[in-house]
Amino acid sequence: MQQAPSAVKVKAIDCLHFINGEFVPSVDGKVFNNINPATEEVLGIVAEGGSADVDLAVQAAKKALQGPWKKMTASERTAIVRRIGDLILERKDELAYLESLDTGKPLWLSSSTDIPRSAYNFHFFSEYIRTLSNEASQTDDVALNYSIRRPLGVVGLINPWNLPLLLLTWKLAPALAAGNTVVMKPAELTPMTATVLAEICRDAGVPDGVVNLVHGFGPNSAGAALVEHPDVNGITFTGETTTGMAIMASASTTLKRLSYELGGKNPNIIFADSDLDEVIETTLKSSFINQGEVCLCGSRIYVERSIYDQFLDKFVEKTKGLIVGDPFIQETKVGALISREHYERVTSYIELAKEEGGHILLGGKRPEGFEKGYYLEPTIIVGLDNGCRVVREEIFGPVVTVIPFDSEEEVIEQANDTHYGLSATIWTNDLRRAHRVAGQIEAGIVWVNTWFLRDLRTPFGGMKQSGIGREGGVHSFEFYTELTNVCIKL
Ligand code: NDP
């Protein structure tokens, strides 16, 4: 297959930090290149922040906590939060192009999901916070207790590269709605939409210093400096489990509040009584959408043995129809992986699968006709068991394993046999089984006969090594606020 010419209509941007309401270079002038994963060309340059830049941003955020932001009423503040969502929608085409340039994901996906859902985060949280009330309780006729909520303070938002704007706004919207000030540190691989977002915040009327952005790397760089900074009151982090461990160690010296959304290796459990066509249609998405680079992807597929062969025939046939290629072509279903380093990591698992005795039923290689870009065919692996590293470790690419099972008890045990616990999907038309299995799966989110269906009021997060705490609805505000109990003697 030859790669067709791309239809990019928006130019990439160079990315500066945004500190105290202004776009600024790094204190030491350092920059790094931003690479297009679909072409391996340089898209532009990015300011490389370090501890001096983070310190400026944190000081601006700390000062802004006492400025006009603090004096605003909740309705004034939430009107600004809502306006950010409106401006994202006004600039949705530009943002979608930039997101696809940075990540290599298909443009239709950025346009249909990443950007509208980013806007919705602001619309949702600006309204939701106004529905919350605090607790009050009376101790006989002795005392009256009530609680008041205040902003947590300066919050550090550290984000990954797979859903850059969507995940950043998932944190920024409730943080602002609750009256905090923030320093954002996007992944160094995807700096562009965060930079536009900073501009949008300014245009929406966010006062100087309330939203700050520092680009840079993680370890020994901007990310680590933000975690270590004594004036940062909390860190909300989405990323790999091992990074979460490093952050927890360094945040312990200043005892920061932490919220963690980490890695996953999620089971997709398919019982024989399910509707197979519906299963296949959704399993294509839960396996390969966004190149499989979604923490919620169901990369461990368990299929009841009586339909195992039938499932595989249909699944392989449908997967063959997924077009891999240029993110800017409408027909493309699977774009480019994020970076050379990640491409090599993902393909190393395909080699490992062979060493572990697995059979690559489909894919496993670079599609023909692509000399440049980090493209990989959707890959289906069979013949492995739960003890194999390929089944146990997060690959975070378009790679799934399929394993047969014989009983409900067996599949529950296999699904839970992991140190991850982010999400799971169960396919069955037996209502009692759905409830029974959902109640036994160790995961923060269990979907029944669907995947990725989200209501932002519901708790989102992982069990075990997939996370600490929950965000979404009231849970977000539990993280982004401090609670004080006032006790009055009657
Ligand atoms: P990483 O953990 O590598 O990076 C996440 C962010 O942390 C980046 O901004 C990174 O900076 C920064 N960082 C890295 N090291 C440190 C450090 N020592 N101190 C402070 N910051 C640091 O994750 P990826 O970007 O590779 O994202 C993929 C991972 O994210 C997968 O494991 C995936 O499952 C998980 N994820 C989880 C989600 C969830 O909701 N549970 C949702 C989406 C993804 P830089 O990249 O610049 O080095």
Image (spheres, rainbow, N blue to C red):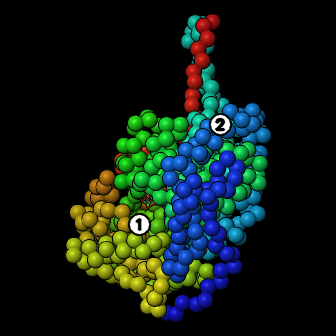
233 and 109: which is toward the camera: 233
- Is any atom of residue 460 visible in this view? no
Crowdedness near tag 2: few (<14), some (14–19) or many (≥20) residues, C-alpha within 10 Å: some
Instruction: Please report the residue visible at 65 percent of the width from the left and 80 percent of the height from the top.
Output: 8
Is 374 on the left or on the right of 98, as rendered?
Answer: left
Query: Which labelled disc corresponds to residue 63?
Result: 2
Asked if residue 148 shows in the view, the reply is yes
Q: Secondary structure at mark 1?
A: loop
Above or below — where is 30 with respect to 229?
A: below
Q: Residue 136's spot in the image, x, y percent?
A: 61, 21
**Closer to us: 378 or 47:** 47
Query: At x 36% / y 81%, what residue is drawn?
Result: 364
Residue at point 67% right, 56% down? 23
Q: Vertically, is 371 above or below 274?
A: below
For residue 249, side relative to residue 168 (left or right): left
Compared with 446, 481 (above or below) is: above
